Amino acid sequence: MVKTSPAPVILPAPPAPPEPMGLIAGGGRLPIIVAEGMRKLGHPVKCIGLAGQYDARLPTLCDDFSEVGTLRLGRWGRRLRALDVRYAVMVGRVDKAKLMHSWASIIRNRPDLRVAKVWFRLQRDRRSHLILAAIADELAQDGVQLIDSTSHIPDHLATPGVMTKTRPTPRQRADVAFGWPMLMELLRLDIGQAISVRESDVVAVEAVEGTDRMIVRSGELCRSPGWSLLKGARAGHDRRSDVPTVGRQTIERMHKCGGRCLALAAGDVIIIDKPDTLELADSLGIAILGVPTSPAGAAELDL
């Protein structure tokens, strides 16, 4: 049976400041950027950081900060409501391997009954977007609505057209036009979020290993530099958390492995620390462009 993607989730509009905004933070730089965006817009930031995951600098950016167990879902909503939070954003990596690599780790993180209920309910299909939807439902029962995780960082999203000073070569433009309809179909089928292309050949397709490992594999399969990476978001993706990202590490890894062009679904991919990432790409000779999210998206651009 072919997997089909759900219809896009209808999300509540972001509230106007000075409404207190909740932030449920995993690891990495993204929660810091979101907290800064919330503060810039005038929202008090009420954050709960997932234990063992969040960046140590994050508490200094928040008006209120609490650490919560990553598997203590019932605690999340109760803590945010105690802070008068009605709307929240959930972003950041969760190291599932560190969290659940053994029964000892699971027991140490003391999953509560709500996590157990979600895990049992999804026993037949535990894809990430279904787990996210279940978490959102549990938080809603506590009076906390998850909203679009990009609401406070619009300046960090990919935009249509070439975003770097470095422009794609004619060969790279042809590869993007060739691969884009294939990427859109893979996203519709929920297979992966990226492919790599070189001279009208698909070099690699992202699956469960993630984009970073796929980049390394592309470099191993394509020894000569110049291949292109195309990346988007699963069709009907849930923007409460499931928004793909690229950043400096992506660019550095691409350069090391021979990638020289990065095509991103406009409005659907976050570029972490966008100005710095674009500057790094220019210094390494990598072109970055945003492509409309349609099968013919690349043909719609004047490159």
Image (spheres, grey):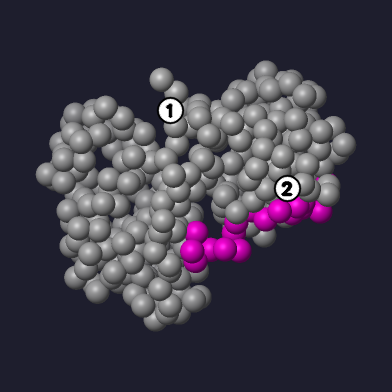
Residue 213's mark? Answer: none
Amino acid type at circle 2 is: Leu
Residue 207 drawn in magenta: no
Determine the residue positioned at 63% across, 23% down: 204
* Residue pictured at 61% horizontal, 63% vertical: 155
Which residue bears the numbered disc 2?
A: 289
Identity of the residue drawn at 31% across and 41% down? 131
Q: Which residue is mark 1?
A: 3
Magenta highlight on residue 164: yes
Locate residue 174: give its quadrant: top right
**Residue 213's quadrant in the figure?**
top right
Q: What is the secondary structure assignment of the residue under circle 1?
A: loop
Counting from the top left corner in percent of width and height, residue 243 is at 49, 48
Q: Give the amino acid at mark 1.
A: Lys
Q: Which residues are magenta?
A: 150-167
Residue 217 against residue 145 in the figure, above or below: above
Q: Would you say the magenta stretch is mainly helix, strand or loop?
A: loop
Binning the other alpha carbons within 10 Å of mark 1 as few (below 14), some (14 to 19) or many (20 upward) gives: few
